[in-house]
Image (tube, grey):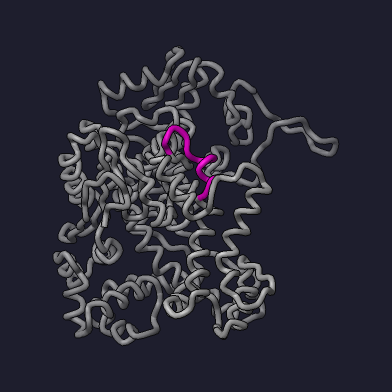
Amino acid sequence: MALSPGVGVGFARGDDRWSVATADPVALIAEAATADAPRWVWWGRETSDLLAGLPIDRCWDVATVHRFLHGTWKAPIGVIWAVLQGLDPDSLPTMGQLGLLDAPVDEGDRELPIRPDGHLRPEWIAGAFAETPDRLATWAGLALDAVGQQILLLNRLPDPDRALATARSESAADLLCAEMTIAGLPIDVPEAERLISASAGRRPRTSAEEDEIRAERDERVLSKLESSQPVNLRNPGEVKAMLRRHGHDLPDTRAWRLEQLRTTDPLIDALLTWRKDERIATTFGWHWLDEHVRDSRLRGEWASSDGAAGRMSASAGLHNLPSTMRPVVAAEPGHRIVRADLGQIEPRVLAAVSGDRRLIDATRQDDLYAPIARALGVERDIAKVAVLGAMYGATTGESAGALAGLQKSYPIAMGLLEAAAESGKAGRDVVTSGGRRVRMWADSSTDGDLDRAVSVAAARGRYARNAVIQGAAAEFFKVWAITVRRRGRPLGAEVVLCLHDELLVQVPADAADDAAAMVDAAVGEAAHYWSPEPDVRFVADVAVVDRWSEAK
């Protein structure tokens, strides 16, 4: 489909193309979506934004699938089309008059969307496709053609059926992202103002007052010094020198190192408190509140893929709200929040994508690290660090010995990670179990520098090792999220936050318990759809709360 408010909507199915002139095409689609459940096809987010909130579950977003197939972040329509047609994306035509030295180009019939050279006409991409209902139908037909070509590419992947299923779920996840972008996250504004005031100080009325408040915040640290020598607390070098003069000759000023001295030195305690307050003031302070919170909703731009391993991403601080600010995320009157967190998701995903039977057996336990610890003959915490180290490429420290045990006890799972790491070291892209391409990078600074080349290759290996698991976990998470979106509709449930392996769902208070049960059951449904190994058990911690901070 292709639609434009005030103009109409164009449809394509098979070889048929037709259009309907209407001032409200979204209402027409809503009626059709309720009566029927086709798999709707569209070009990208511009359409998702228009359809947000409609009961559409089966869809195909051409731009989202392009990012999935090619491991890219941006997906302009002209580039998508060029890639599918085997054209050079760098030769895209542009709108405007020719320069004095430019050779004339045969642009053909401007009423047609495709130029003689095979590229899409830039005027159509820029909006000319939406000028008439008939053009909308033509544009919808091109989107359908693109889907057919994308399916051919999916069929070339190692597991075409899984890749096709993932392309569909990724498309639905992007529609969910459009909805979260528009609707926002419910915020208790008075609580936000209270917490910001406690950390950042009063709301400044002028830039001069803002500087004054900043100086007051700094003074709470500087007043602990015996010397009156000025110190820029925002300069790590000056902070390190300040601590040296104070009697602490430290290699760095990382928080974990300073925490060890906090209870014995008021200066260290004040500095660590200042750092937390400074983060609130600069990142989640008054400017953040004024810019991103409207109508008691925090709004940022959500994307279904970060352009790397495929995790969902968000702006406006939605993905890195500090724990001290979580009390501001609160259910609206008459509602509650269902908070759900997938348990030990990455090692369970490793079991699923590797097919390692012994690791699969471990997933049957609520705590899969316990049977792994028994198999390795080590403490549970060491087993956990070893498993995470295997997935993240951390092979030193107290868990190094346990890593050898992992390779012996779980050779198939460890072999998958090693194969990914070797591909990354060699600069070869890796592909998740669902078919997402994760690109490796080249570094021209390694030319002639062997040590630098070895370091870059090792970094790529660590990244690739984790990307095949993190990417697969992201694919599972998104299947879970869209399942909750679909199953929660009759309950009035609204997915308001997706954070790596955590969901927040706002629901009417009288449906909260039913919604919690639904969210928990959706884990099993998502596993049935996604998991290559049906015996892998996935678990979630689900709670009904009024504020995000109330969840454990």
Residue 153 % position (x, y): 42, 48
Residue sitting nearer the eye, 116 or 485 = 485
Quick check: can you spot residue 160?
no
Quick check: can you spot residue 38?
yes
Residue sitting nearer the eye, 225 or 188 = 225
Identified at 79% across, 36% down, the residue is 103
Q: Is residue 125 positioned above or below 210 on the image?
A: above
The image quadrant that residue 260 belongs to is bottom left
Identified at 44% across, 40% down, the residue is 298
Identified at 49% across, 68% down, the residue is 272
Q: Is residue 198 positioned above or below 518 on the image?
A: below
Q: Is residue 186 positioned above or below 108 on the image?
A: below
Identified at 39% across, 81% down, the residue is 395
Residue sitting nearer the eye, 370 or 202 = 202
Residue 250 % position (x, y): 55, 83
Q: Is residue 509 magenta?
A: no
* Residues drawn in magenta: 285-297
Residue 324 % position (x, y): 40, 56
